[in-house]
Image (cartoon, rainbow, N blue to C red):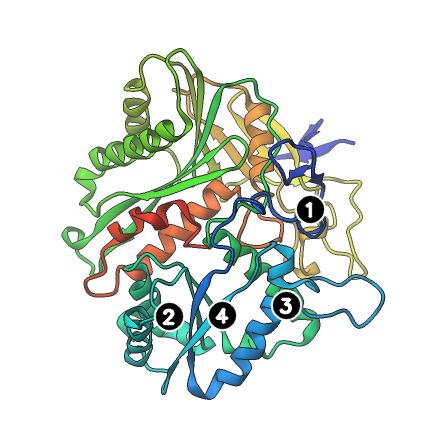
Amino acid sequence: MGQFVAGTRLQPKKAPSVLYTFDHTRERVHRSADKGLDRHGPLTRESFTPRRPRVCVICQARRRGDVELFLRRLRDGIPSRSRQPQVFENGFLRKYDVEGLDLEFFETQTPAAADYRAAALQAIESTSGNWDFAFVQTDEVFHKLHGERNPYLVTKATFFQHGIPVQEFEYETTQMPEYNLRYTLNNISLATYSKLGGIPWLLPVSSTITHELVIGLSTALVGQGRFGDRRRYLGVTTVFTGDGSYWLANTSNCVPYSEFKAELVRTLKAAIQRVKAQLNWRPGDAIRIVFHCFKPVKYTEADAVEQVVQALTGYDLDYAFLHVAGRHDCVIFDPNQRGSGRSVKGVFAPERRTYTHLSPNETLLVLTGPKDVKLPTQGLPRPIKLNLHPRSTFQDMDYLTKQVAMFAAHSWRDFFPASMPVTIGYSNLIAGLLGNLSTLPGFDPSVLRGKLATKGWFL
């Protein structure tokens, strides 16, 4: 099967499909993350704590009945009305092998941000206290509110300051038809388990390298105003091991651009040193560090990475710096692809995980195949473009491309196929959320470097 890019006929390759693993012996595996969880349970089913998470619920008083029903369905599932298995019929407790959710409600009398903050503080200061998690009911209209007028942002920041992860849901979500609600609850339960520190699954590892880190890099622009001297830059680092294990998200201090390189070096060093200690790296170990960057790689970032890597002496070390670009001028056509579904969508779109090399350092990778296109009117999806920085010492583009494809099927936020690897997806989620939280007076991003750093608080 030939394919075309920029008028040139290509012979494409295809990255292998992901085999999800649900135990450390790699014996419990499945091609589907969702079905694998139903069959095997999560990877940390035996070690997960707390077995009965203590959860506070913030909701409007007039919405409480619907919120109680929604959370009961989240906890216990929605029973099948037929003999055929249905999505999320087991609920959070059985799917993730958790003993219970101890819920306590704190009501707001109005949808105002001040009332939400008051309810959150009441929960934190209550005799129950010491919460493992918080659910927050919001309204769709909150998206139109900015800064301290937004109840969602105000409540999230209040709980973050006390190290409590949060899962919000809109009231409109609780009113979904049952069929749609099953899928939404399934995704919320996955994110909730991850925010509580659980590991749903991991990825297979074929590398002979002793230790491999895959690090996502992003930048958040914080502060308001049109003047450059009021802008501050904040670096975001997400760290995974080669098997997809999420280790931490680290953020730098907010600094002017002139100080950003030094701050990025400090942040990267701190993140790598923390993981290095936990993984017990030994002198002489073979180490590979792969950096994924969403924005074009500037010498600021390249210099920072090189400075950090050169400081890691005593190891057999390789590194790669990969720009993962969603915007570019290239399109791949598969002339044999007739589309998918009754509405015939994705005509000429190559299958997901198809890739082709443009040069030794450039590759196009398809992460949106015909089945992933939602509507025929969306047209032909674009591949992502991988650009390997010339300073990289590890230059196996086949390996790096397959790794990106694997990490694009590895989000603990939902079960949908992603159009970006999780390294980029997580970093962008963090950057976006921090950009919004920075509009709140007095919010300090350093609170996210504590116990929240190792949990998926941003999912």
Give the residue type that dot 4 points to.
Phe
Any mark on residue 66, and which?
A: none
Residue 165, relative to residue 155: is it above or below? above
Please name the residue shown 33% across and 35% down the image.
Answer: 271
Image x and y of residue 390, in percent: 41, 20
In which quadrant is the N terminus drawn? top right
Any mark on residue 40, and which?
A: 1
Q: Single out the mark in the foreground, 3 or 4.
A: 3
Label 3 and label 4: CA atoms lie apart by: 17 Å
Image x and y of residue 63, in percent: 48, 84
Q: Secondary structure at mark 3?
A: helix
Residue 109, relative to residue 383: is it above or below? below
Please name the residue shown 39% across and 37% down the image.
Answer: 296
Q: Are marks 1 and 4 in contact (CB under 8 Å)?
A: no
Any mark on residue 152, and which?
A: 2
Q: Earlier in the sequence, mark 1 or mark 4?
A: 1
Label 2 and label 4: CA atoms lie apart by: 10 Å
Q: Single out the mark in the foreground, 3 or 2.
A: 3
Q: Secondary structure at mark 4?
A: strand
